[in-house]
Amino acid sequence: MKYVVLVPDGAADRPLDDLDGRTPLEAASTPNLDQLALEGNVGLVNMIPPERHPGSDVGNLEIFGYDSRKFYTGRAPLEAASMGVKLGPRDVAFRLNTVNRDADILVDYSAGHISTEESHQLMQELIEGLEGTGFCIYPGIGYRHLFVMDDGPDDLKTVPPHDIMGNSIKEHLPTGKGSQQVCQIMDRAEQILVESSINTERIARGELPANAIWLWGSGRALSLPSLKEKYGFCGAVISAVDLVRGIGRCAGLRIVNVPGATGYLDTNYKGKAEYALRVLQDENFVYLHVEAPDEAGHNGDVGAKIKAIEEIDAKVVGPLLNGLADLGPCRLLVTPDHPTPIKLRTHSRDPVPFLLWGHGFEPDDVKCYSEKSALKGGRLVKHGYNLMEYLRGNGSLQ
């Protein structure tokens, strides 16, 4: 049996007046997803536990089959695992965003989706310019980086920068024991970045400067039982997002790099499907994550979100179905990790629609894949981590 998990990150949404009361998922043309819904099982799942913040870290951990209330230690440790950074017992990891601020307002969580090349140069300037010892910076992709402190504070409350765009920075700084040290590092970094020639050039081109950093998502190393132990799955994770790759690595999966996979709207959709099918030639499991709908949601761009969903349907789902037909018995799970509503421009904890299709799943009465059709189907899964059990064939959805 071959198993595929497809995660269109943040694809779920809420009805929009501009779409005549429809969601982007309803407005998008998705013939392949609708065909799967017609032939499989569709329902809603409470992906985010009440105790957890509605983030991609928690949502994807649940989809992988792990109860986030037991295993979650923070977002940054997942990204550290993805980057091959081994955290010591005293280390505390932070996600480091290059951001744009205007006085006390956080304007953009990604500094205008700064390029990896520019961002790496800025990280090198911070490595050279920040005084003191006891911390390391590991450059990542685009605006996403890793900051590790030796014996750092592990009981901080931090806020994701994409949750506070357009809001006061002072009102959302880290709090808790040790927060003053973290805030001082952010202040010192800003002094270095505002003087960088990289930002001078960005301003001259009419682009947002990456004139500050934001440290968040802190935590210590986590340990997970492997998916092979839990379900007998052997395979790979395909994602351009460090935290998803990190969960996969901690779960015992290989990380597959797809050329042109950006973690943004211009990602290589077709390539992701092609590489997923390659994995399934020799192994039995692939976790395929596409970030694009989430980015469109954070940008409040309904047109881009609809396009991203349509690209996933045409260039990922369609080719996957064609390829799976030659691989024998198979099962497919499709589910977002959380909604990213256009109106909110950040994540919510609303239930998300899931779809189970393939060997052993008999059709239900749902005819298409959307939030509304999933609700009408009357099926609600209480915990996100249960979906992997259903995919594996353990337990009944009824």
Image (cartoon, rainbow, N blue to C red):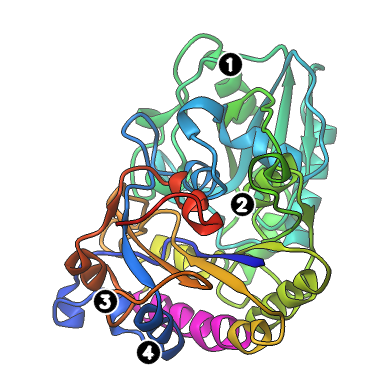
Name the residue tied to disc 2.
210
Point out residue 254 in the picture as x, y percentages from the top left corner: 80, 54
Please name the residue that numbered disc 3 is placed on: 366
The residue drawn where x is 56% and y is 30% is 74
The earlier-in-sequence mark between 1 and 4 is 4
| In the displayed structure image, the side of residue 100 where residue 336 appears, left or right | left
The residue mark sitting in front, 1 or 2, is 1
Query: Residue placed at 60% from the left, 44% from the top?
Result: 97
- Observer-side mark, 4 or 2, equals 4
Tag 4 residue: 29
Q: Work out whether 288 lies above or below 176.
A: below
Picture coordinates of residue 249, whole percent (x, y): 75, 45
- Identify the disc placed on residue 154: 1
* Mark 4 residue element: loop
> Are discs 2 and 3 less than 8 Å apart at CB?
no
Residue 206 visible in image: no
Which amino acid type is shown beneath numbered disc 2? Ala
Disc 1 marks a residue whose amino acid type is Asp
The structure residue drawn at horizontal position 80% and vertical position 74%, both measured from the top left corner, is: 281
Classify the position of the N terminus by image quarter: bottom right
Q: Tell me the chief SS of the magenta region.
A: helix
Nearer the N terminus, badge 2 or badge 3? 2
Q: CA distance from mark 2 to mark 3?
A: 46 Å
The magenta span reads 302-319
